[in-house]
Amino acid sequence: MKVLKSITLVFIFLLFSCETEEFNNNSNDDMDDTGEEMPSESIVLANAFPNLSFTQPLDFQSPDDGSNRVFIGEKGGSIRVFDNDSDVMETTVFLDLRGTISTSSEQGLLGFAFHPSFESNGYVFVCYTPSERLSVISRFTVSSTNQNAVDLTSELVVIEIPQPATNHNGGQIAFHTDGYLYIAMGDGGGSGDPHGNAQNRTNLLGNILRIDVDNTQAGLNYAIPSNNPFISDTSVRDEIFAYGFRNPWRMSFDTTTGKLWTGDVGQNEIEEIDIVEIGGNYGWKLFEGTSCFSGDCDDTGLIPPIFEYNQDNGDRSITGGYVYRGDAISTLQGKYVYGDFVSGRIWTLTEDGSANELLLESGLNIASFGTDASQELYLCAFDGNIYKFVVSEN
């Protein structure tokens, strides 16, 4: 994320940090600041684990293994595990890479994902930056004697991606129902994609990648899915699923429709939300959102965002979220919930992009969203807390 890199954001963090456990959605107002109707259900953020605190939490994941455990990834290099219980008092370090990785600017432990067969094979995949010039996706295996810890000696480096700068590293990884691993990579950093990576498909930056981690080929520790879109083009990297992204910060699959959603952080004007299609070109750096950024302004063949917002109102860095598929909040059902790291605002968006509603003014630096085993929705905030979306009892 571009916003993690500057001293200015240290002050933003201090300004927006909040120690209260709930944030009301100002339900007395029927309209948001764009004149759109607010949800009728009063939704608040509750501190999900009030006895715990975290340091720059960046990812929230739950394995499909029946254990009801929650895993939180921290930027500094650790993944912590605990029972999904509001009264939980302590965590266990599941993976510890602290002190062995680069945490400069937007680097660190940026994402992790459990293999679809995690319950039987114990595989967890992690995206992190071992140095300022490299991102890696590694596979670790859970210890045979402790289900709450990985065996550090089990690391298998699956793929390495050179990084020209310490920002725009992306880093979200996720498995789809097709069994493949999807990897979100930013354009490599610098202002305005100075190396032209996002439109240059000979490298892996500025793309959503898709690889098969259950097979290997040609000396790789992974294989290329046979239906990846560019495998017949020898001038394009076979791993690319879609391209033209600046910094796709947080992506997720809708568990009902299977569609892949991502927020893409803008340069100086526009933040965007994309539904990612196979082989799609999402425009950066030719376009920032739907606004021409460079080149001849020809948008032929480009896929525009389904929704965008400008940065004029203090919203400056989108954090992609999830399509809500839980049971606890009826008014969120089927809506994409996302936020902004800088302003702390949280919105909902319909799949066709036609209805965007302000849900909450959280006052938080929202780094990531996540779901538990019941598909209830949470967010990771840089005040050190994990919050859960709930219906107010008032």
Image (spheres, helix red, strand yellow):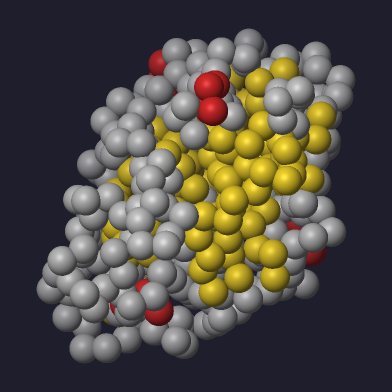
Report whether 370 appears left or right of 13: left
Q: In which quarter of the image is the N terminus?
A: bottom right
Q: Between 31 and 188, which is closer to the camera in this rendering?
A: 188
Q: Which residue lies furthest to the left in this view?
A: 300
* 319 to 369, vertically: above or below: below
Report whether 264 appears left or right of 317: left
Q: Residue at image x 45%, y 81%?
A: 193
Q: Between 52 and 185, which is closer to the camera in this rendering?
A: 185
Q: Residue at image x 56%, y 75%?
A: 163
- Residue 101 image position (x, y, % from top left): 75, 62
- Residue 305 image position (x, y, % from top left): 29, 57
Residue 376 seen anywhere in this rendered image of the structure: no
Q: Residue at image x 73%, y 46%?
A: 153
Q: Residue at image x 27%, y 88%?
A: 295
Report whether 147 appears left or right of 252: right
* 233 to 21, vertically: above or below: below
Q: In which quarter of the image is residue 14?
A: bottom right
Q: In which quarter of the image is residue 143?
A: top right
Q: Between 96 and 34, which is closer to the camera in this rendering?
A: 96
* 4 to 76, vertically: above or below: below
- Residue 380 image position (x, y, % from top left): 66, 40
Residue 236 seen anywhere in this rendered image of the structure: yes
Q: In which quarter of the image is the C terminus?
A: top right
Report whether 159 appears left or right of 68: left
